[in-house]
Image (cartoon, coloured by chain):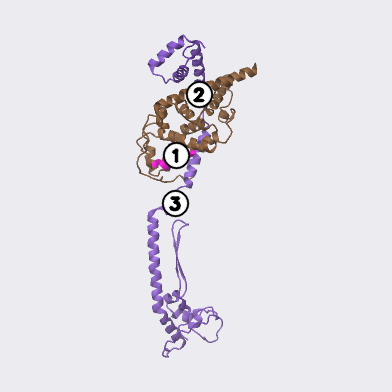
Amino acid sequence: MSCPHLNDARREPRELELALWAGGDLRAAEAARLEEHLAGCPECRALAEGLRRSQAGLAALAAEPIDPEVLARIRRGVLERLEERRPRPAAAPWLYAAAAALALAALALGLWLQASRQGEAPQVAEIAEGAREPGSDPPPPAPAPRRDPSAPRLPRRETAAPAPPPAPPSPEPAVQRAAVPPAPEAATESIVIQIVSDDPDIVFYWLVEPEENADEPVSS
Amino acid sequence: MDHGDWTPAGGGAAAIRMTAVRPAAEAAGGGGADPAIGRALAGDARAFEELVRRHERRVYGLARRLLGRPEDAEDAAQETFLRLFRSLGRLDPARPLDPYLYRVTVNVCRDHGRRRRLRLAVPLEEMTAAEEPAAGGADPAAAAGLAEERRIAAAALSALPQKQRAALVLRDLQGLSTREVAEVLGSTEVTVRTQISRARLKVREFRDRVLGGRKETKS
């Protein structure tokens, strides 16, 4: 080691300075001073030459071509992953507002159906009785008998219009059915209101259950 | 694939705190305000794809040199762009995107490196073999020599400590100034100058060892 700068305590600073110089990171004045030293110092020149070659290797690496297919794969991957995360229309606030409005409407409909069932149930009996005995006065309403828990539950139509004359089997007593207004009849069965949104994952159901005594015979 | 409209989270939020620096790749079209940011922020999927196209080479190139393996670099580049998408609302469209992307890429690669810390070092042959151009051309010997230099340089990079590698790759391969490197890495210019000069010395030493070892083997 002949160079005093590389052979004493200042070795590392000198090496670091050479490394900065090799990358063009020294100020002009500093670079000029170093180059002056390099002209007379074979050891530093050798180190500088080694740095120049390794810097050329880094430059060759930086210039290495990139396969366009790799870039296309990255782009595809990014766009596909974004597509997977794409917000669904259900996330729009207006849809939630519309769903809430529909739910309120369903609630109002349910309340109305319940109210109409309570008000119309006796009328069902009257109409049914009237259909059985035309021209006669309607009998006073009898108290509803307690259900025998062991007894099988019968469909309301059979108890509301008992003892029809023997007739060929018919699926529905057409006369009675026609005499009963549709709303009260509907109120005796469970009603399911389905509110469907654009998003198949969001469906609102409103279930209107008939009251327990709605299944009881209203007359005997 | 349907590239309809979608809107990134946080649209319209405050701008990032990143200091605007002149990206070294400005000449390549990477600097200055990017109107595609605003359009992507408004939900234009095509605009975001345009952003990816514009920056994918730099992002992948940086990740490739920070991580070594091409497949790791692909993952990191994708993650970088996904983070960009999530942050669109916090970006200032009037500022260049490169400093932000460089910083995110470095962070993603650092996280990636932590997850794979236990993995074996990348073999020298894997460093550039995957994307090496086909041998041949006018001077096959020169092409082989260039490929060899690239492999050695890539291996030398992978042997560097993480911070020195990041500083050197940003400075010598991506072409940022030392000030820009300091801003991307959240460091000082003095620290970066020390990091890159030490890294250059190690690369030189690595190269000398590899080539010296081969000469000894041949003789």
Looking at the rendered structure, which numbered label has been put on residue A58? 2
Colour chain B appears in: brown
Residue B176 seen in the current view: no
Q: Which residue is mark 3?
A: A88
Q: Which residue is mark 1?
A: B49
Callouts 3 and 2 in the same chain: yes
Query: Magenta residues?
Result: B78-88
CB contact under 8 Å: marks 3 and 2: no
A92 with respect to B111 (left or right): left
Q: Amino acid at mark 3?
A: Arg
Q: Please check the rendered image and state whether residue B190 is part of the magenta-colored stretch, yes or no.
A: no
Chain assignment, label 3: A
Placement of B14 over or under A141, stated as above or below:
above
Placement of B90 over or under A118, stated as above or below:
above
Q: Residues within 10 Å of mark 3 (few under 14, many from 20)?
A: few
Residue A90 seen in the current view: yes
Cα distance between the residues tagged 1 and 3: 20 Å
Q: Which residue is most to the front?
A: A9
Q: Amino acid at mark 2?
A: Leu
